[in-house]
Image: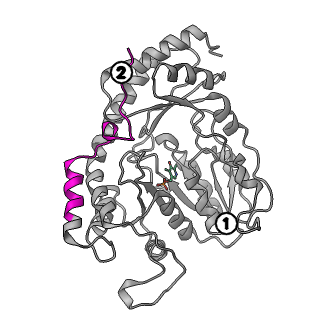
């Protein structure tokens, strides 16, 4: 019998409880729901900065907004290029276009799905302004290599940590602190949530101020009603911030539990033929990715899913360099800032089409859930006789 698995779509797979209810009530009873005049978002920013040992944290309305703020901090001129990965949420890419910059897709490592530093190096041109690294499924990207490339070429390194809350490099340094800016999401399906929400962290004063202004219509609230720069309204509300503060306090427990279950699953799956298991070092386990180097991930995922195991293949319908949007206009009838279709990324294509399978991990798993997943793999991997080569 396959047990019911916790779902991030309801309370079974979330850590939402009495603390969040009390926090929301506190805000509503205060009568102040806006973070410009309230206290909750400011407190969330202090708590986030303290958690990561960063000089600045800025709260905003989503992970996509956080990444947009980071692109603003990198200050590309229109038509400048930002190198990123095609295996990510579109929220990584949209902010590049929103600043009239060109996303340049570099190919990924065939096992981790994270940016291949050599492909990044090959993608750099005189117009490159920044590298946007994603810690896919919670696995740390090759940050030391990417930092070195960025420094060599005078580029900003942005870290998309939406899937990697409390993720670490193999030596224990936290991800989000190697780039100039680290970006986080509080969307429903992330480690912690307030429905939608985002945070950026940085040590640098000028980008922090630029991001703060952009998130609030360029309005320097300390100095009258002057608009100092172009900006939008990306403010987080006090309701979101109050919930996010409760969730942030629970984050270490969430990540510790996910690590415990993921390591147990990894141990149970070790030795099964044809599966490349994820490197556990520093992993934050948003998902538990498995690569089938010989292919067959869609077929195996279908069999496991039919048994009620929370698994799917590919993650995306297509790598983002092959999204339908590149065939049409970007603004009005114009294709600016694009000059041609994105380059091929064969490793990313193969991951999505043939080799990648992702297993849900949840802090509320029990040993029974892990065993049920492992039993499913044992059943179908051995029966289907996947070629281990
Ligand atoms: C979720 C996610 C985003 C976007 O965050 P939203 O809060 O949904 O806007 C960006 N990048 C990655 C890697 C994500 O997983």
Considering depth in this image, is 240 or 277 the residue closer to the camera?
240
Q: Is residue 99 above or below residue 199?
A: below
Please name the colour scheme applied to the rendered image: one colour
Residue 137 can be seen in this image:
yes
Locate residue 292 relative to residue 270 in the image: left or right: right
- Quarter placement of the C terminus: top right
Locate residue 346 relative to residue 255 in the image: left or right: right
Viewer-nearest of labels 2 and 1?
2
Q: Secondary structure at mark 1?
A: loop
The image position of residue 316, as x and y in percent, is: 60, 40
Tell me which label, 2 or 1, sits earlier in the chain. 2
Residue 100 shown in magenta: no
Locate residue 343 relative to residue 173 in the image: left or right: right
Instruction: Measure the C-alpha gap from mark 2 to mark 1.
Output: 47 Å
Q: Secondary structure at mark 2?
A: loop
Instruction: Give the residue drawn at x 75%, y 52%.
Output: 342
Judge: label 2 CB < 8 Å from ligand 1: no
The image position of residue 195, as x and y in percent, is: 38, 53
- Name the residue tied to disc 2: 3
Residue 180 can be seen in this image:
no
Instruction: Give the residue drawn at x 65%, y 63%.
Output: 97
Please state the extent of the stretch shown in magenta in the rendering. Answer: 1-26
Label disc, if present, on residue 255 of the rendered structure: none
């Amino acid at each position: 019998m396959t047990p019911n698995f916790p779902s991030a779509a309801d309370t079974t797979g979330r850590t939402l409880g009495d603390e969040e209810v009390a926090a929301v009530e506190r805000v509503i009873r205060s009568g102040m729901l806006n973070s410009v005049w309230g206290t909750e978002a400011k407190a969330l920013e202090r708590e986030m900065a303290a958690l990561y040992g960063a000089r600045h944290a800025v709260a905003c309305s989503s992970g996509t907004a956080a990444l947009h703020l980071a692109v603003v901090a990198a200050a590309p001129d229109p038509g400048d290029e930002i190198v990123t990965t095609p295996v990510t949420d579109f929220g990584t890419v949209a902010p590049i276009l929103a600043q009239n910059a060109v996303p340049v897709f570099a190919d990924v490592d065939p096992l981790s799905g994270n940016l291949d530093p050599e492909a990044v190096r090959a993608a750099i041109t005189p117009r490159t302004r920044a590298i946007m690294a994603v810690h896919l499924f919670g696995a740390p990207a090759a940050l030391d290599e990417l930092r070195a490339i960025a420094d060599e070429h005078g580029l900003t390194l942005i870290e998309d940590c939406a899937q990697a809350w409390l993720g670490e490099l193999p030596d224990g340094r936290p991800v989000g602190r190697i780039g100039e800016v680290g970006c986080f999401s509080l969307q429903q399906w992330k480690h912690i949530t307030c429905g939608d929400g985002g945070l950026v962290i940085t040590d640098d004063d000028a980008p922090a101020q630029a991001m703060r202004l952009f998130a609030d219509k360029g309005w320097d609230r300390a100095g009258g009603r002057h608009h100092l720069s172009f900006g939008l309204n990306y403010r987080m509300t006090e309701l979101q911030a109050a919930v996010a503060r409760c969730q942030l306090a629970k984050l270490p427990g969430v990540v510790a539990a996910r690590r415990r279950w993921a390591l147990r699953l990894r141990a149970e799956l070790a030795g099964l033929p044809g599966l490349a298991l994820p490197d556990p070092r520093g992993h934050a386990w948003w998902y538990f990715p498995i690569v089938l180097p010989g292919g067959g991930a869609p077929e195996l995922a279908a069999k496991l899913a039919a048994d009620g195991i929370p698994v799917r293949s590919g993650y995306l319908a297509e790598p983002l360099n092959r999204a339908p949007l590149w065939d049409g206009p970007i603004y009005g009838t114009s294709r600016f800032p694009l000059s041609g279709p994105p380059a091929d990324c064969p490793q990313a294509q193969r991951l999505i089409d043939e080799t990648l399978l992702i297993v849900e991990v949840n802090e509320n798993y029990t040993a029974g859930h892990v065993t049920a997943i492992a039993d499913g793999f044992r059943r179908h991997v051995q029966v289907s006789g996947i070629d281990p080569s």
